Amino acid sequence: MSSDALIDELHAGLARIAAPYVKDLQLRVLAASPGEVTLALPVTPHLVHGGGVLCGQAIMAAMDTAMVLAMQSLTPDHAFRPMTTVQLSTSFLRAVPADVGEVTLVGRVLRAGKTLAYGDIALSTPDGKMAAHATTTYALL
Amino acid sequence: MSSDALIDELHAGLARIAAPYVKDLQLRVLAASPGEVTLALPVTPHLVHGGGVLCGQAIMAAMDTAMVLAMQSLTPDHAFRPMTTVQLSTSFLRAVPADVGEVTLVGRVLRAGKTLAYGDIALSTPDGKMAAHATTTYALL
Amino acid sequence: MSSDALIDELHAGLARIAAPYVKDLQLRVLAASPGEVTLALPVTPHLVHGGGVLCGQAIMAAMDTAMVLAMQSLTPDHAFRPMTTVQLSTSFLRAVPADVGEVTLVGRVLRAGKTLAYGDIALSTPDGKMAAHATTTYALL
Amino acid sequence: MSSDALIDELHAGLARIAAPYVKDLQLRVLAASPGEVTLALPVTPHLVHGGGVLCGQAIMAAMDTAMVLAMQSLTPDHAFRPMTTVQLSTSFLRAVPADVGEVTLVGRVLRAGKTLAYGDIALSTPDGKMAAHATTTYALL
């Protein structure tokens, strides 16, 4: 399957499964290969708090979504296999200014076992600096 | 200060500071004392994903907000002291069904140092069962 | 089963299963009930680093051991059920001085599912202050 | 400074500062550059539990030590700058058999701020498979 076809499938899966609260993030898949996806998150005023920076809540929501899509990219038919987040831990390394345009997330599956999967997600600003990093464990149902 | 007055101040702080994305959660402060707050999160269809349960992204967003309010409750005048989340780690223990009504979060500050603070947050369904648990570190600026 | 009998079984399990590296901690079970154990960790010079405080490595090792014992206390015959740590996250809240004597750990199972279990562990100095806190997920094999 | 000279300084720092409990791990620095170190951890019987695998307590202890050394490699004179672990989170991905010989840890500083630093550590078996992964936050004093 070409990368473009995989991207289309991930977008379709997101449209079908994600809560409206997640769709509000307006995430776009920029690139995808089995076990790794790159997403763009537009830093809209909707996601910016009174301190003038991207709110951590939106960052965590995008982190989790990136890993769901990275997991989906690994399944044979790129279907959403039933799974649940066991644990997600996010570290916030730099504030993301409101005028940055959009940020990029790269989610990678580091270990896909039979019942548990583990991965990390890096969120970077357009200058290439990592602004947040997450690790996560999923249970496959 | 009475608990009711503190609740009013926390609501006012949330209205002034929170990103629209966080306000979409429609969190309400049910109880507050210095270093501990109890919030209600209505499980609206907006927060439910295709699997029919409250999405983890909304849970994490509510967890973070609960700790911001618990920290605010500790400051002398209950003002939002400038701070930033360093790390937030959430464990998901049970799925929260879409028809549960609302869930309750209790955020507690366990350690408030000069530069760093640490706390935990428990999210429970109406039957009293813990459905998610988070720990978090904040940096005071 | 009395608490004393349970304590004896936990000590026996530890003696049989733990690595010598863990036995070096000289942990003692002070109290135990199903799903909760209290341990004492002597702060010996062996565990103190050049900065004159209990090293974090010993703290984490004791944290993990506390949860293994708390899980064992839940099994019908208090046998060591085969399990593996999926994730352990420790936050260090206060330095523990070398001359403190011993510290106390309370490990609690917060959720025991069929395949995964979750708990937390608090480490306190004799003055009752929490010095470290951990959360952990176990997989039952 | 050559890599060999840096390795010598890290070994000297470890000998001077580490608790005996950490020295028991017999960690060796294999390679070092500013912000990244590679360590070898011999899987000795001392570190193996009754299940016949490297105990998680030794893994976490080595993880923490790897990051201390990676931080030291970043300081101008490679001195141990006073710092403290704020948080360390380890995920265990695969059991490490007792007969594996030694495992390798790569610790990387991903963000070194003025007061906080963040990094990750990967532990791999000789076949190149990642067996454990940790992330950690340090406070610079």
Image (cartoon, coloured by chain):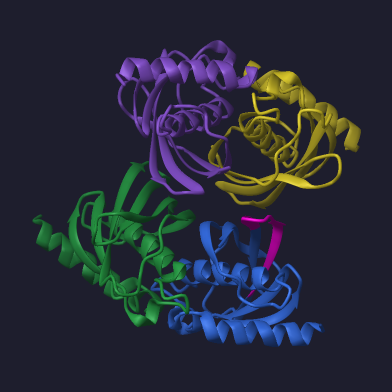
Chain colours: A green, B blue, C yellow, D purple
Residue at (67% x, 70% y) in the render: B70
> Residue A33 placed where, x, y %?
18, 52
> Residue D88 placed where, x, y %?
54, 41
Q: How many numbered circles are shown?
A: 0
Quarter of the figure with residue C138: top right
Residue at (73% x, 25% y) in the render: C13
A134 in relation to C7, above or below: below
**Residue D129 is at least partly visible in this image:** yes
| Left or right placement of residue C18 versus residue C141 in this view | right
Most foreground residue, A86 or B66: B66
- For the C terminus of chain D, the quadrant is top right
In magenta, the rendered stretch is B104-118
Residue B112 magenta-highlighted: yes
> Residue A47 placed where, x, y %?
39, 77
Residue at (69% x, 77% y) in the render: B78
> Residue D4 placed where, x, y %?
33, 15
Most foreground residue, D90 or B8: B8
List the single residue furthest toward the left: A2
C94 in relation to A2, above or below: above
